[in-house]
Image (tube, grey):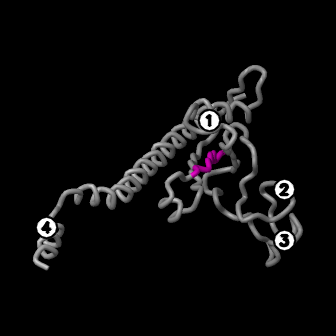
């Protein structure tokens, strides 16, 4: 009996391997936290790169520049891709532009003339500012505009979340969006 007590008390006092056990319990949580921090840093870096690419692209777009053998729309897309080379998949980048007559019209609905804006007749019930044949919540027209027009450039990218805990909180995909508003220069 005394021998069993001595063996039990020596096992209870033995602390070899405790550090290994503690590390085995804490390491997965610590590594997931580090991975989450790295992922958020990558997302923030990508958002800054996307914002920079959008700003540079809008500066090019407002000049009306067209490279030989290209269209203006393709020149805009190529400029965004060149500013995000290696970081983003060019096939997933979405570039959209909306044209407005002035800065006050951005995000404004087309003007209503009667109570039947949503299902009415253009010219009778509402003013069809963007010319698409139906009333819209936003009067912007698709395109790059002409000299003096206001253009809103929006570049989006679906970022795939790699960290399991982060994806459980915010989903598998986070759409990064950058937007810039410019007035086109008086070009020919």
The residues colored magenta run 150-160
Neighbor class of circle 2 (other Cα within 10 Å; few <14, some 14-19, many 20+) is few
164 with respect to 146 (left or right): left
Q: Provide the secondary structure element on which disc 3 rests.
A: loop
Where's the C terminus, which quadrant? Answer: top right
Q: Which residue is the site of mark 3?
A: 125
Kindly indicate the quadrant of the structure image that contains residue 175: bottom right
Q: Which residue is the site of mark 2?
A: 132
Residue mark closest to the camera, 2 vs 3: 2
* Among numbered discs 1 and 4, the one appearing first in the sequence: 4
Residue mark closest to the camera, 3 vs 4: 4
Residue mark closest to the camera, 1 vs 4: 4
Identify which residue is drawn at 57% across, 46% down: 180
* Among numbered discs 3 and 4, the one appearing first in the sequence: 4
Q: Provide the secondary structure element on which disc 1 rests.
A: helix
163 with respect to 145 (left or right): left
Neighbor class of circle 4 (other Cα within 10 Å; few <14, some 14-19, many 20+) is few
Residue 10, disc: 4
- CA gap between label 4 and label 2 equals 85 Å
Identify which residue is drawn at 57% across, 40% down: 54
* Among numbered discs 1 and 3, the one appearing first in the sequence: 1
* Among numbered discs 2 and 1, the one appearing first in the sequence: 1
Residue mark closest to the camera, 1 vs 3: 1
Residue nearest the observer in this picture, 14 or 119:
14
Residue mark closest to the camera, 2 vs 1: 1
């Amino acid at each position: 009996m005394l021998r069993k007590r001595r063996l039990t008390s020596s096992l209870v006092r033995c602390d070899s391997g405790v550090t290994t056990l503690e590390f085995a319990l804490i390491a997965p949580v610590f590594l997931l936290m580090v991975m989450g921090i790295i992922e958020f840093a990558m997302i923030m870096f990508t958002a800054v790169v996307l914002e920079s690419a959008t700003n540079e692209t809008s500066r090019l777009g407002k000049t009306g520049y067209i490279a030989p053998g290209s269209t203006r729309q393709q020149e805009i897309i190529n400029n965004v891709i060149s500013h995000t080379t290696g970081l983003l998949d060019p096939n997933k980048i979405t570039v959209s532009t909306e044209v407005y007559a002035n800065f006050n019209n951005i995000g404004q609905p087309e003007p209503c003339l009667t109570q039947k804006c949503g299902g009415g007749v253009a010219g009778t019930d509402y003013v069809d500012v963007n010319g698409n044949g139906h009333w819209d919540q936003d009067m912007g027209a698709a395109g790059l505009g002409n000299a003096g027009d206001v253009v809103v450039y929006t570049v989006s990218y679906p970022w795939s979340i790699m960290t399991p805990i982060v994806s459980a909180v915010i989903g598998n995909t986070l759409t990064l969006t950058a937007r810039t508003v410019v007035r086109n220069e008086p070009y020919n």
